[in-house]
Image (spheres, rainbow, N blue to C red):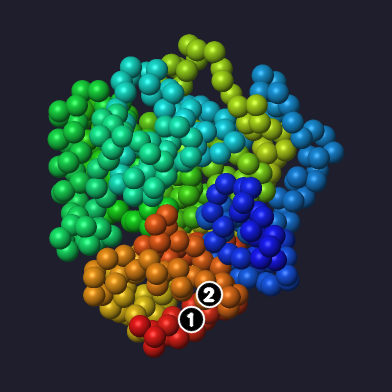
Amino acid sequence: MKEKIRRYKAINLGEVTVPYFFSHTKGGYVYTSRGDAVLDFTSGYGVTNTGWMHPRVLQAIRQQLKKATYCPPWLPTELALDLSEVMLEIVPKGMTSCLRATGGGEAIEGALRAVSALTGKSSLVSFNRSYHGGTSKAVRISDYISFDLLEIQKSDRHFIKVPFPGIYDTYNNGGSAITETDSLNKLENLFNTDPDIAAFIAEPVIGSGGVLTPPEGFLLKIQALCRKYGVLFIVDEVITGFGRVGWFTASEAMNLTPDALIFAKGMGGGHVPIGCAVLNEDLTNILKKYQDVSPTFGWTPLACAAALENIRVIKEEGLCAKAQLDGIKMLTTIKGLMNTYMPDHTLEVRGMGMMIGIQLVDPVTHQPGRLLVNKLMLAMFNQGLMCSADWDSHTIIIMPPLTISPKDMDKGLGIMETVIRRYSKKI
């Protein structure tokens, strides 16, 4: 096994965090090639919201396999029509079109192409700790410096970051929390002084940066500033969409009415690659003036059939309401565990719906508890529970499938308690 992993890492770019090959899934478990059953508390990083291999979605895929799996992007299909109409039903009023994509980064790029065409401006603003995808502009509006994603001139004036409020960065801010006022003042100052700003892009809950949840009403204030200064407001719901935070979209929960919404991950639930940028009328109309650049594999009949059934499952199984209730239970339980066993090593436990972050800190140096994060995650995996972390190992991230059973939830929380209690005696 070790030799195969070595060979894999030698010829495949990308991270490998566990020393076993993924084999298959069943229920709420993923299995390794040596037969280990590992309870999943990650949803493949917020993807499998309806669970791994949901039988209804698999049946929709089987039925579509008998008809067609692909068609070129210039041929319309009824499935794509149905999916676009469903997407427009779940977003705020005023959105008029769907820009097809195979994933989140591609959807972001499409939306930013429309922004550039409409505004003629170059500068984009986003939050520190945000991640928006691995394509060209998506990486640049992400916090590529903190996450060591690529080398770009750090003074690049076209990709500007503002601090996200909260205590996540107190170790770099003299021990003080970054306030909502800090963020809003920085943003308004940018809008006042830089006439080249085209858009502000935000994750409503910052995912890969550590499940950073905004103060109540904060993003509404961001949206108001964008409206005041004529800056477009884009919301990236790649992780937060499709029930993850307890509503179909976080925009719905926060009463946001953005100019563009970005979706992927939970849209197909891991059954198919699919994404979407939903645009307002102005962004829609500007793109109609140019040649279409729809991706070759965007919204194939197979992907649309799977996504449509996946959305039906979320609605008909009441997964949004379930995520709210299960999320409250998990957040309360995890806060209790950390307060009991590791209070000095816990900077914050936070979350929204079934999206929870446990941020650890070294109590002596007051720096991120990276080593402890990695040790706890590996120990949990070896005990049969898979969790994930943010890009730079500040925070353990918990994102189970929304379909998780009470039995599996209790089992996973029990494994967490066993591992945390054991390690609390060593630190």
Q: Which mark is residue 419?
A: 1
Q: Residue at x 59, y 36 (%)?
A: 102
Q: Position of residue 109 (x, y in %)?
A: 47, 30
Give left or right: position of 156 versus 331.
Answer: left
The residue that mark 2 highlights is: 380
User: Are the residues at dot 2 and dot 1 in contact (C-beta closer than 8 Å)?
Assistant: yes
**Kind of residue at badge 2:** Met
In the rendered image, which quarter contains the N terminus?
Answer: bottom right
Q: Residue at x 21, y 23 (%)?
A: 195
Q: Say whether residue 245 is visible.
A: yes
Q: Quadrant of residue 328?
A: bottom left
Query: Residue 6, which numbered label?
Result: none
Residue 278 relative to residue 206: left or right: right
- The amino acid pointed to by label 1 is Val
Q: Is residue 360 above or below residue 417?
A: above
Name the residue at 42% across, 77% down: 333
The image shows residue 20, relative to residue 292, as above or below, that is below
Residue at (17% x, 41% y) in the render: 186
Q: CA distance from mark 2 to mark 1?
A: 6 Å
Quadrant for the C terminus, please. bottom left
Q: Of the two numbered discs 2 and 1 on the same chain, state the one appearing first in sequence.
A: 2
